[in-house]
Image (tube, helix red, strand yellow):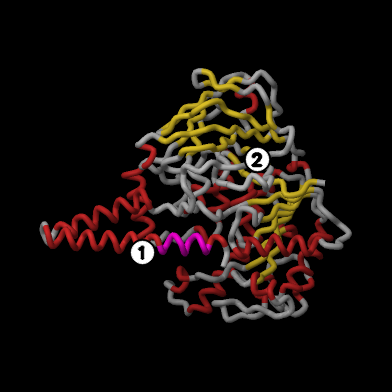
Amino acid sequence: MTRKQQLLKRHRRNKRIALLVSLLILVATGLLVAWWLPLILAVLLWMAHEAWFSDHLFYSPKDNYEYAFPAGSEQPGLRLEAGRLLLDTPLDADDTLIVGIELRSSWLGRFCDPAVELLGLDAPDRQAFERGVGGRRYLNLTGAAEALAAGRVKLRGRFCRIKGQPVLWRLRQPDYRQQRVMVIAPHADDAELAAFSLYSQAAESWIVTLTAGEIEAEHYQRMGLPKAEAARLKGRLRAWDSIAVPRWAGVPEAQCVQLGYFCMQLQAMQAAPDRPQASREAELSDTRLFRQFNGFALPGDVDGAPTWHNLVADLRALLLKARPQVIVLPTPLLDPHADHICAHAAVLEALQGLEWRPDTLLGYANHLHDNDRWPMGDSGTGVALPPHFDSAAELVPCCVALTLSQQRDKAMALGMMHDLQPRAPFKRRVRKWLQQVLAGRGPSPYGENEFFRKAVRRHELLWVLRQD
């Protein structure tokens, strides 16, 4: 059982206990006061839960985030005076800039998302944190080097206050946009969510999608298709998306590859590398249906067997063909999704003994172990660093800043992805409406799916996993 599954299990157990206690209180109220009062209270309690207590947060908001940045990256001289950030040292515009601050939530910050507003930039920013926040957090000022050096940046707490003096870390990396980049996507849309801006600007880009993402095809079953046929249709559509959507960013079709392995089966493939693992829902044991849009043959095309050995062989062939200087892939340090963890492991295995090795591995996290809402805040705002509580594990952020035009292009790319188009379940739509009305959370202007809020932001946050 993964850490994420353990946290969810504990969360659900605690929730069942809370529901049982609430039920007993409601029954007692009905017996002692009036029979109709528990019905009204039950509706109000449910509304309060959906608006204020439905976030999956598996740590205390008062816990300090613990990051260990590389030695020499701390930039002395940053100070906060009358709400203004002052720094006497000039900065490079491409530096990744991280500012550590101490936050304390106001009482309203337990019901509305606390945030730090950054004024004086080309466009104002607001970086949000957990309700009831109390501890060390990390703002992302990447892209604000000129304003920071000129003393124009002002910080203002919204439903929280800033305590003490901030600390600045300046992380310098090569401009990866000038290099050959290969993005490893476990599913269609992972590349766009994590690194659309990077791959759309790179000197040369390859997008390699490992699975067809065919499961959970209820949207297509509602069209009248049997379960297996719906899964096959969904897989074909997502396979098409993985080839077609990167063309929006200028990536040639010949450099977009779909490997067609089956969703949520990579872990089983890794456990038994020679044994084929059929699709859970599509009644398929041959990957070639989902590889038909590829522009060239790969080792796995010989038999179409969904095995770990075929996956690693496919990746080896692609690495030798593309010879990327930078590989962008999920990082299991932050991302708990089983397919994402296995995608990382498959790339590392494919690189073993290979005659070509990239200069840099950049990690990304489209999911988190302990905070399902991260990145917190609204579309278009900055991406503060995620919760991290192990200072022994060095994490080196590498951030790409996006203009408003680039954000819109990214939103349109996500809008082309079939998996992000269906309407959310009714209960989730009601929850979002209650949060909008009672908690002040705004909808994304780009789409209803939660990933439009999470991914269309001022920053794409990546992590330097290895740099030669």
Which residue position holds label 2?
A: 399
Which residue position holds label 1?
A: 16
Q: Which image quadrant for residue 153?
A: top right
Q: Amino acid at mark 1?
A: Arg
Q: Which image quadrant for residue 158?
A: top left
Residue 182 x %, y %: 74, 54
In this picture, is 284 found above or below 162? below
Q: Which image quadrant for residue 138?
A: top right
Looking at the rendering, the stretch of residues picked out in magenta corresponds to 5-13
Identify the residue shown where x is 13% and y is 60%.
Answer: 36
Considering the numbered disc 2 on the image, is that residue within a helix, a strand or a loop? Answer: strand
Residue 306 x %, y %: 69, 76
Cα distance between the residues tagged 1 and 2: 40 Å
Identify the residue shown where x is 56% and y is 61%.
Answer: 3
- Image quarter hosting the N terminus: bottom right
**For residue 79, side relative to residue 225 (left or right):** right
Residue 42 x %, y %: 23, 58
Considering the numbered disc 1 on the image, is that residue within a helix, a strand or a loop? Answer: helix
Q: Amino acid at mark 2?
A: Cys
The question of residue 16 being in magenta is answered with no
Query: Dot 1, how many residues are within 10 Å of its Cα: few (below 14), some (14-19), or many (20+)?
Result: few
Does label 1 or label 2 sit earlier along the sequence? Answer: 1
